[in-house]
Amino acid sequence: MSEPLRILSASGQLGYGIPEPAFRAGLARAPSMIGADMGSVDPGPAYLGAGKMATDPSMTKRDLRLILTGARALGVPLLLGTAGTGGSRPQLDATLEMIRAIAREEGLHFRLASIAADIDPEAVIAAQSAGRLTPLGRIAAPTPADIRASRIVGQMGMSAFSSALDQGADVIIAGRACDTAIFATIPIRLGYPPALAMHMAKIIECTSLCCTPGGRDAILGHLTHEEFTLESMNPIRHATPLTVAAHALYEQDNPYTVGEPEGTLHLDGATYHAVDEHRTSSHGARWEPATTLRIKIEAAQHIGERVVLVAGSADPTFIAALPEILPAVEATTRSLYPAEFQLYPRIYGQSGVNLWTPTSPAGEVCLFIECVAASQEIARGALTVFKQYLLHHGFPGRLSTGGNIAFPLTPPELSAGSAYRFSLYHLMTVDTLDGLFPVEIETL
């Protein structure tokens, strides 16, 4: 194609509310396709592990209705990735049920593709045995038992979306997917330069977050064979060379490379220039096809049930003594309460967020004590003992035998549901991407 391709990114976190005025403005520009990302591992392992959405069902369906009816009114493809927050089979199925319900309610007819991202635990165990599993960051090597007890997804790239398009899909709802694949697949299939398409996709997947002031309004990408131009559909959000270049670094450990299943995007040669105060263009990135195929895999494992204790203190002597008080109280609790449990104390105002202890003492702190055990009853029982001995623990300089901590709620032991941990956050080397992410087609 010789004409500019217009790609509308509707949402970088579908289900939290797509700002409708900007989205409608984007539809009025007659985009060639609409894309949206729906999930991430950013919310932590619980949603993937439980197979549940992080978003409110009514808001999620509202957002899905907006993008589905918008795409069908224009007759353009709709691509959605990482369905249901984590992109696992239960989350994908829940999203598909909403899509089917909306189609019935709106009288829509189209070919719907769903792409599963779940990975067989035995395939991961085999890859680990063959030395084809590489950790991303500091994560413990999983045992085969850990892998089998986990819900595992792989991050699909462009090949899976392309397979669905080959089968005539109008709407694609994918499990866990690379954000870029949602927006780069169609341009590359049409013959646009992969480097430009991938670079643009890397930025627009978060909609107008690449603007000043940043926001979640829809953004339009204009792609030619020479460059791409970004334009927020909210006139108060401006894509500037600085903000766009900064967002190209977003979520990357290396500011110059973006790894994808099909290759690597190199940004060291990219340049950015303002078209006007509202729009910025870029070119100069380079695409290097992969010689070794790897997919990122993510997994969450259930580790128990969680109860938390919340308390506060403004006693400077108590706060200063906390490094000695907390382990002493835990030891007392373990001597009295025989069940198995794990305690994870966080001191907000001192070390709850920071990974170091401030040089000056905090004026007040919030104690957030997490207990994980085989059941809610065990976790709560352990914390009730811990709470009482913390309340009356003796320490040097104590002025009062009680009242050194305050509880904002009663009971102060709060149920926090099931606890999960990331058991896999790795790259897995594969021989081929074909068939790894199966495509199912249905006609609505």
Image (cartoon, helix red, strand yellow):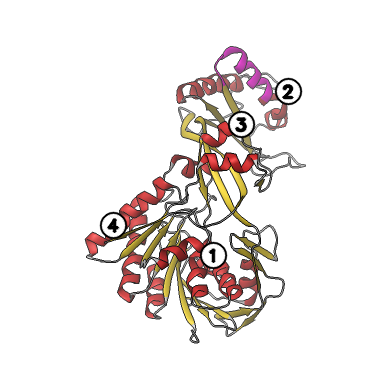
Amino acid carrying mark 4 in the image: Arg
Q: Nearer the viewer, mark 3 or mark 1?
A: 1
Whether 138 is drawn above or below 377: the answer is below
Other residues around mark 4 within 10 Å, as few (<14) / some (14–19) / many (≥20): some
What is the CA distance from the residue labelled 3 to the residue labelled 1? 37 Å
What is the CA distance from the residue labelled 2 to the residue labelled 4? 66 Å
What is the CA distance from the residue labelled 4 to the residue labelled 1? 25 Å
Residue 344 is labelled as: 3
Amino acid carrying mark 3 in the image: Tyr
* Badge 2 or badge 4: first in the primary sequence: 4
Residue 440 is labelled as: none
Q: Residue at x 56, y 73 (%)?
A: 197
Number of numbered discs visible in the structure rendering: 4
333 inside magenta stretch: yes
Left or right: residue 121 versus residue 172 is right
Q: Residue furthest bottom?
A: 2
24 inside magenta stretch: no
Under circle 1, the secondary element is helix
- Residue 201, given in percent of the width and then of the height, sits at 54, 69
* Badge 1 or badge 2: first in the primary sequence: 1
The residue singled out by tag 2 in the image is: 397
The residue singled out by tag 4 in the image is: 100
Give the residues drawn in magenta, as a range: 327-340
* Badge 3 or badge 2: first in the primary sequence: 3
Amino acid carrying mark 1 in the image: Thr
The residue singled out by tag 1 in the image is: 180
